[in-house]
Every structure is written in structure tokens, then in C-alpha cells.
Amino acid sequence: MALVEEQPVAVKFTGMRREMGGLLLRGYSLLLPTIGLYRFWLTTWKRRFYWGNTEIDGDALEYTGNAMQLLLGFLMAVAVFVPLYGLFFYLSTLSQEAAFIGYGGVAVLVWFLMGYATYRARDFRLSRTLWRGIRFDQAGSPWNYAFRRFFWSLLVIATAGLAYPFMAGDLWRYRYRNSWYGDRQFGFFGGWKLLAMPYYLAWLACAVIGITGLTIGYSMGALPDDGEPNFLGYVPMAVAALLIGAVHLLYRARELTRMLSSVRLGEAGLSVTLRGRSLLGQYLLFGLALAGLLVVLAIGGLLVLGALAGDAFADGAFDMAVFMQHLQSSLLVLLAIIFGYLLVLAAFTIMAELFLGLAFWKLVASNASITGIDSLRSVRARGEDRALAGEGLADALNVGSY
Amino acid sequence: MSIPARFHDGLTAEVRVAGLEFETVGAVGTLVIRGADHSEIARWPAEILYALHSRKDELRLGASGQPDGARVVVQGHHDVARVLATIPQLTLRQHQQTGREIRLAVTATVALAAVIAAYLYGVPLLASRLVTVVPPAWEQRLGETVAQQMEASLDGEAGFELCDDDPDSLANQGIERFGNEVLAGSGSPFELDIRVVKSDIPNAFALPGGQVFFFSALLDQARTPDEFAGVLAHEIGHVAYRHGMEQLISTAGTGALIGFILGDMTGISVAAGLGATIIDARFSRDAERQADAFAAQAAQRMDFNPAGLADLINRAGADDEFARALALLSTHPLTEDRKAALEALSRQRPTGLQPPFTTAEWSAIRDMCRVTGN
């Protein structure tokens, strides 16, 4: 190996938004005739796109999973959910207090299971990721992770968020120290100390902004004890909420930068620099794109409904009763509304994928570089890990990302 | 001549820059992978080659029998096209794979459609079977919970106010006697608890466990005892068939199914609720028909015309635009068909039956909400 310090190797992302858009459009149009089952194929195609376009030192990642595995995993998760569903049903029929306590219990159980599910899903994705012919993998126990996450989150709630850096440090460490590339184990050298400063600053900023917004809103009469609220008073509160969202994004960029840059793989190290303003820009673009698309959809929807149920819009006013009568008597209007709802839903998820999901992946990939990459050439393959069938609960709980 | 490629052996994370050549001996073609120094790295016969999914203008080849991660990667539009032209089996195999995937997706979709169809027809049946194993005590408790929730949502904290809180009054006695006579012989495990309560909403409904609520606004609109008796008998029909419980079971099942389709098993999305409501409206229409038939049967034993119930519901619905607006989701479809069906059922009633209420009882019932009310 060369004695001179190697230059860090930049990660490249070669995917185009247009390509992803086409993939999503095709996928969503196939969701309808397949009664939703195509989502497993869509997820698989999306991952192939993300993985296959992420190039490290000349070689792209490869996603080796397939739709059947996801479908099987989902069926298994359903087997877990059916008894839970029965429990839900039984609780809802008991006395009001019992139902309330029962719902709470089920919610806590689901919150716990989400930790298990996210860890399993990460395992599934890593063990189906190939780079230079060598597979990644994740060891560790999903139950252990679920317990950690669960109790940390209780502590975070109990301390009004102050314990968060400790939780983040612990969970990041657990995830990465249990990750493998071939026979080489990942290391993680970050911790709460890296997060404490930015987190507490953000926490303080959020508290100040929130209290200020609430106070101004309250003094303007947005939340009167009785009588009509002054709607103008909601403006400072909305502004405060937006500002808090922005602070959250700025913090998130900082956390990802510091934590991802603490990941090591033997002598190789990852280095990521995310700018908060890039993340903010993504959300701004997403908001604009979504608003534009929704306006187009709304105009189209009104035209369709106007053609089908014109008299409800007579005299320039909307007559709810007449409209509802149409709903009742005409299957066509009902179908148009359901279709419209699905369109809006699809518009939202497609825009989110294009302007948040894809943009985020691209941002992270193109701001990442790897040092000491030549040291990875000696990594050897490990035995196969085919025990995982699908992402299981992650699908049913909707926690799987990418 | 050779095509540039990158080679991963699947054993170490080494990448080798290679050149590809294709040899044909007779009918057998072999891909020969050579290193930069032209030495042979590997030979992969064409029949074990397969192409993997990859980004645009990139071809990733694997080979069965080789290590799982072993790959030959060709980049660039031109070179990819050359390889594909040289080894037509690759395209063929990819088409076969696509065909398998499509068949799989179609099979899964057909299976799901079959499940949905079986469900649409099976669940009402299943729910009516399941209802018979639900312990009556449990259903009764459930009915009380539902009543509490309903009172809280409709009337605020105060709850419903009875029109006549004396259970021994002429009106209440008459209603109770009528109710018991209608329910008699149906084998219902429940004891009826019919309450006429004050409310501006013209409505009547039965809850699981034998509770029947009749709102004063609906009573005010009744012109004949037939109409009142018809609606009451209809609601008692719901009690006898345990429709409330049945509905609850099928709603839970529908929610599970919709969640399955949408992949949202927590069922919190709007789509889940909307879909479940539409499917359940179908079930409840069958239940309404059953309850109508039950009322018509009761009219074989007592002298009232069950078609009156359609008159009263229509009249109440006509006045109330809000109720009409919600008729899509309503359990009472206000159609002419329904009245026609009831009239057909009541055509051959025996004569000389006892009226449902005595004249004195009926006038007491008519006045029960006015006297203690206003």
C-alpha cells in the first residue's frame, strides 16, 4: 500500500429525477389494477434505482432483494397483526375506561414493535446490498434494539426532550457497531458529546420560538376562554411552527453530518458534510411542487365534478345537500371522488419521493467521501444470511423508508 | 476487440479491470474474462449467465454456480449493446424472468381479488354465525358502552332526557307490552329496554344488547299508531337479529381487509375509513331488509300496517336535509322499493287482530314528550 496519504474518494449519484418520475408514475398506475399489491414491486424498483445509481470508487451498489421477499414478509407481519387486531376489537367493545386503557396499551405495544421493525428492515436492506461483489450485513438483536429505543424514548419524554442526544448516540452506535461489510465490522466513534451542543441550542431556540409564538397569539385572542377566537392570532403561531420546523431541519443536517462522519470501516472512514440550508431548500421546493400539483388536480377535480354533478354548483354556490344526493344516487360521482382522493394521495407521495426522498439521498451521496478506501480490498465474503424473509413488521407499520 | 469490463470475484472486495471475449465452439458459447495483462481470470459458459437489474447503460452479469456476488460489469451504451447482441440468451432470460414476475403479480392479485369477493359475500354470513357465539352478557355491556358514547357525543355531558321517567305510566307500559309481544317467539336472549327520549333529531335506533332509542322528534311526526308501531317493530327486529353486534364484527373485519390492501394495518388513513364505510353500508342495507321483514311478521300477529314505517321514515327524512345528505352512509336507505316490499309483505294480513295500542295508550304515547316536556 502506498505510504502517501490517499485522497478521499467522493461518492457519486448518477440517477436522474426524470427517470425516477417515470418509475413512480408507472408504479402508481399499476397499483390500482393490482389492488395495491404492486407496492412491493414498486419498492423493489425504487431501491434498485437508488442503489444502482450510487457509485463508490467506480462501482455502483447493487440491491439484490426482490418483490416476493417483501410480499412474504408482509404476509408474516399480517399474521402478527391479526391477533393484535382482534385485541383492538375486543377492547373497543369493553367499557369506556377499559377501552381507553386498552388502546393506550396497544399504542405502547405498537411503539415498541416499531423499534423491532426498523431494525429488522435495516437488516433486510443491508444484507441485500452488494458492493464489489461483497454483501453488507447487520448482526445484533432486533429485540435488544427495540428495548433500547423504547426505554430511551420514555426517558426522552420524561425529560422533555433533554435526554435525546444520549438516546441518539446510543442507537447510532448500536446500529453501526453491529453492521458488517463482508467479514469486516463497522465501527462508530461518535456519541452524545457530538450532538449535545447543536441539540441543546436547537432545543432552546425551539422553546423560545414556541413560547413567543404562543404568547403573541394568545395576546391577540387566538385562544380565548370563551367566545369567538381571533383568527389573525393563529398567524404568529403558524409562523412559530414553521420556524421550529426549520430549526429541526438545521439540527437534523448537523446530526447526520456528525454521526455519519463518525462511521468507520476498519481503516476506511466515511465523511459527510450536509448543509442545513440545502435540506431547507428541499422542503421549500417540495412545498412548491406539491402546491402546484394540487392546484392542477383541484381544477381538474372541479371540472369533473361540475360535469357529473353540475346542479350542486348552481348559482355559483355549492349546495352540500344536492351534492350529497348525487353521491347517494350516482355511483359515477362516488367513483370520481374515490379516484380523486387516490390521485391526491399519489400526488403527495410522488412529490415526496421526488423532492424529499430522492433529493435527500442525492444530497447525502454527493456530499459523502470515503478515506482509506484501498484498505477495503482485503475484505472477504462471509456466509449467506438468507434467514430474513422480507421486512416483516416494517411493511405493516409503514416505517420502512427507501 | 475485447470489451472493457470490471470484474468482482464475489470472494474478496477486489475489483479487476478486465476485457471480455466471447468464444464459440460449435453451439456452445463461453464468456472469457481476461485481466489487464491478458491472462485469463474466468470462463463463464453462456448458459449459466444471467443479467441483473442495474442503472441505465450498465450491464451486470452473474453466473449460476459461481459465488453469489461474482459480477462482470459492462458500462456504456455501446458496449452494453455489443454484449447483448453477442449473447442473445441474456435478453431471452431477462424476458423469462419478467414473465415470471408478471405471472406472480397476476396470481397474487387474483388471489387477493378472490379473498375480497369471498369476504364481501362471506363476512355477512360469518358475522351472523359469529354473533351467535357472542355471550349475551358481553353484548349487553357493549350496548351500554355504546349508549354512553352516543349520549356524550349527541347531548353533551347531560345525557338523554327521558320523555316520561315513570316506568309505570300508561305510555311506557303500552310500549313495553308491545315490545315484548313483538319480540316474543324470536328466541332473543335480551330483555328490551325501549326509551323515548328528547331530541331534535328525528331518529330511532337499536343498540347491541336490547336497548332501543326513539327520539321525540320522530314521535312528533308520527301520524298514526301504525307508523310508530312499524318503526318500533323494525328496531326490535334489529335487536332480535343482533344486527348491532353483527355490524360491529363485520366493520372490524372490513377494516382489517382494507388495511391489508393499503398496507396500513394500523388503519389510521382516510382511505381505510372511507373504504370500510362504503363496504359496510352494503351490509347494513341487508340488515334493514331483514328488520323490515321482521316488522311485517309482527304485523301478522297484531293489527298494524308495517308499510307505515316507510311513510314515517320518508317524512322525517324529507324534513331533514342533513339526514338526507348523510343517507349515503346511513343505515336507512330511503327508497320507494322499500315501501313496495313492505306493502307486498303486508298484503295478506289476517283480520280480527288486536291493535298494537289501545286508543288511550296511543294518545298517552303521543303526548308523552309534550306533557313532561315544554
Image (cartoon, rainbow, N blue to C red):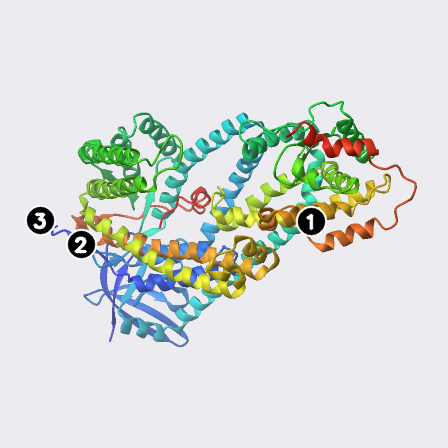
Q: Amino acid at mark 3?
A: Glu
Q: Horizontal and vertical percent for residue B343?
A: 80, 51
Front residue of B220/A218: it is B220
Q: Is residue B245 visible?
A: no
Disc 3 is placed on an element classified as loop
Q: Residue furthest right?
A: B352
Q: Which residue is mark 3?
A: A5
B323 left or right of A264 in image: right
- Residue A350 versus residue A244 in the image, above or below: below
Q: Is residue A195 visible?
A: yes
Q: Quadrant of residue B64?
A: bottom left
- Local packing at callout 3 (Cα closer than 10 Å; few below 14, some 14-19, many 20+) is few
Q: CA distance from mark 1 to mark 3?
A: 88 Å
Tell which circle, 2 or 3, labels the residue nearer the N-terminal end: 3
Q: Amino acid at mark 2?
A: Ala
Label of residue B82 in the image = none
Q: Which residue is mark 2?
A: A10
A260 left or right of B210 in image: left
Q: Are marks 1 and 2 in contact (CB under 8 Å)?
A: no
Q: Are marks 2 and 3 in contact (CB under 8 Å)?
A: no
Disc 2 is placed on an element classified as strand
Whether labels 2 and 3 belong to a single chain: the reply is yes
